[in-house]
Amino acid sequence: GAGFIIDWAPIDFGLHKAMIGRAKADYSLSNATYGVTLLDVSVQAALSFLDALVMHEQVAVAEANVERFAEFSKVVHAQVNAGLQPGADASLADAQLANAKNDLIRARYNDELARAALAYAVGRGGEIIDVEPGGIVKVTEPTAPQQTAPYFENHPLALQGKAVISIRQADKKVLDKEYYPKFRWLGGVNLRGTTFMTNRGDVEAPGVSGVFPVIPNWNVGMMIDLPFFEIIRIKAQKKVVLEQIKAANFAYDLVLQGLRRDDVQARASVRAAIALAANMPIQVEAASLAARQAQARYQAGLATVAQVAEANQILADSRVKEAVANVGVWRALLSVANVHGDLQPFLKAANSATRGE
């Protein structure tokens, strides 16, 4: 025998459509999750770059500090050789120079670690990326890149929350349609072989009659599926899904509240970072003047090596803090961009500042 049968369910009272909606909701959640992941990865890459930028500036400060201590060590040795200062000053100056060199070694080590972390953040793990800061460190009052009011409902986290709500609602729609009956139309055609040449069944066929299916037949029918006893399960699952919908809505509201809170905090951090960066040049200039005066006083015999070393160390610390404060402005702007869910304005401003050198 041979044949085929067709099973078609044209009437299911929307169950098939509800299941398609559930699949589309899963797809929307996957897209939203991808958006959240993309934002997180982008922000992490930007943070890694800013960290590497700070380490790059610290190396420059440490190198300058070594040069200052090297020059001062020459001055001290000249004073000692001329008999104007005790020999202990030369040893103390050499110790301060060695300490500055140790700071430089540590700064270069941290710089390599930061650049390796940056390489990993941009998908080049195992490499050490060179950082070209350009003019970004010098731009302490950039034009605020986030000019327009944020629409937090379009943030990737909010879209993810909406997608979760849609999935829960799609689950409810599927349950709403599951108890309706399904009408299934059946139809088919088949062929059979026979050992008889007539329909009477009393005349045997000669030879190999019946080996091949030559007698046709057809069939049609309809089946109605009604899950009588599924009502208990469906009602129980509906209660669960309704609570899940409530939880998803509460979670979505919580996400929006968190984004609004983070926006206020991020904007406050921008104002504080800009003010701090604007004040740092005053501190650096004062520390630089103090270092020059301390060295001049030493040459005049009015100061000690320890006082000069302390003044130079304060200058080095001030310059490191200045670099951290300048990069801190961009770090604060990045936090605002992260809250708004769009890094493009921040990247344009950073690119403009980098090329502004």
Image (cartoon, helix red, strand yellow):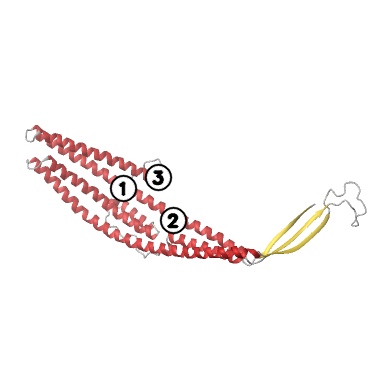
Task: Kindly identify which residue carries mark 3.
Answer: 120
Amino acid carrying mark 3 in the image: Tyr
Q: Residues within 10 Å of mark 3 (few under 14, many from 20)?
A: some
Q: Tell me the CA gap for discs 1 and 3.
A: 16 Å
Q: In the shown orientation, is residue 26 left or right of residue 45?
A: right
Figure check: 187 above or below 290 = below
Q: Residues within 10 Å of mark 2 (few under 14, many from 20)?
A: some
Query: Residue 44: percent from the left, percent from the top?
Result: 38, 51
Amino acid carrying mark 1 in the image: Leu
Figure check: 31 above or below 58 = below
Q: Residues within 10 Å of mark 1 (few under 14, many from 20)?
A: many
Q: Earlier in the sequence, mark 3 or mark 2?
A: 2
Rendering quarter of residue 341: bottom left
Task: Kindly identify which residue carries mark 2.
Answer: 36
Q: In the shown orientation, is residue 1 left or right of residue 141?
A: right
Amino acid carrying mark 2 in the image: Val
Task: Kindly identify which residue carries mark 1.
Answer: 53
Q: Tell me the CA gap for discs 3 and 2.
A: 19 Å
- Residue at position x 29%, y 48% in the image: 54
- Residue at position x 34%, y 42% in the image: 113
- Residue at position x 74%, y 57% in the image: 5
Rendering quarter of residue 175: bottom right
Say whether residue 146 is visible: no
Q: Tell me the CA gap for discs 1 and 2.
A: 26 Å
Q: Are marks 1 and 3 in contact (CB under 8 Å)?
A: no
SS under mark 2: helix
Q: Are marks 1 and 2 in contact (CB under 8 Å)?
A: no
Q: In the shown orientation, is residue 179 left or right of residue 67?
A: right
- Residue at position x 16%, y 44% in the image: 310
Query: Residue 294: percent from the left, percent from the top?
Result: 12, 44
SS under mark 1: helix
Mark linked to residue 15 = none
